[in-house]
Amino acid sequence: MTEKTYTLTKKELNAEKNKAIARFASVASHDLKNVLGGLSNIAYYFSKAFKVEGETPNAMLKLLSSEVANLNTRITDLLDMTRVKQLSKVPCDLQDIINEAITDTKVDGITFELQLLSAKIYADPLRMKQVFVSIIKNSKDAMQNKGTISLKMNIENNIVNTEIIDYGIGMDGETLENCLDPMFSTKLAKAVGMGLTIANQIVEMHTGTLSITSEKDKGTKVLISLSILNS
């Protein structure tokens, strides 16, 4: 008998976690959605049917509704991870996809500094748009919906690189190291959510790469690299 030791890389470990999440989501999501729907209805009923006096009861009802909405979002993210299995790829322009993502995420207080260019890629436009919407939303949250988000593109050696840069709260070392881990959770990581995990999954399915650099209290840069479509 010989003893063998198997070491999983971080990427392989995350892949195993994704499989576990998919199994959990498929079994538990329906039941959890029903429970959360009941809690949401209870909170709504008490807020409308009774005149609740005092700051504390009203604050608790608002907290209940907020937490239910937060859990519903997390369940939706879990389900989304299980659904990202196949892509409907077509020739498309990455610049158009990014512009659509910006339009869908515009809010007062956020301005965009753009250095975009036309870049033809072979991709699923809806899934790729989801990537940029998710990253932009994270940037907005990091800056508390106030500030400038920069999006810059360049093409080098048949690769289109897109940088999304914000000047928000940034991430500490632990959060940065683990922010693509689907089961990583800290107070700061909860704000990041699973959006980055799903975005990374989609980019990898397009044989691209997603990398993140960040510094606490100074901001975050996400770099997405994709192959351009040869004409």
Image: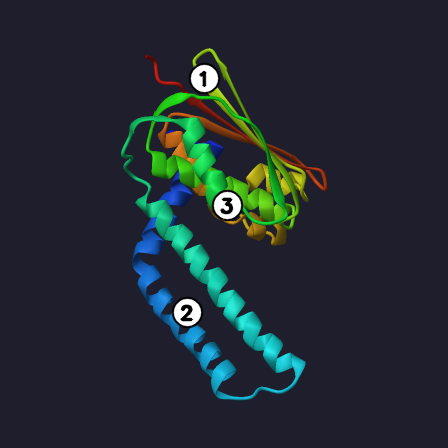
Mark number for residue 107? Answer: none
The residue mark sitting in front, 2 or 3, is 3
> Residue 89: percent from the left, percent from the top?
29, 30
Give how far apart the Cα atoms at labels 2 and 3 are: 27 Å
> Relative to 152, is 131 on the left or the right?
left
User: Which residue corresponds to the image point at 52% horizontal and 40% vertical from the top-left?
Assistant: 135
SS assignment at label 1: strand
Q: Which badge, 3 or 1, comes first in the chain's sequence?
A: 3
User: Which residue is labeled 1 in the image?
Assistant: 159
Tell me which amino acid carries mark 2. Answer: Leu
> Relative to 123, is 161 on the left or the right?
right
User: Which residue corresponds to the image point at 39% horizontal and 44% vertical from the top-left?
Assistant: 18
Q: Which badge, 2 or 3, comes first in the chain's sequence?
A: 2
Q: Is residue 32 above or below residue 209?
A: below
SS assignment at label 3: helix
Closer to the camera in the image, 74 or 89: 89
> Residue 84: percent from the left, percent from the top?
33, 41
SS assignment at label 2: helix
Q: Marks 2 and 1: CB-CB under 8 Å?
A: no
The residue mark sitting in front, 3 or 1, is 3
Mark number for residue 105? Answer: 3
> Relative to 54, is 89 on the left or the right?
left
Displayed quadrant of residue 221: top right
Tell me which amino acid carries mark 3. Answer: Thr
User: Which residue corresponds to the image point at 50% horizontal and 39% vertical from the top-left?
Assistant: 102
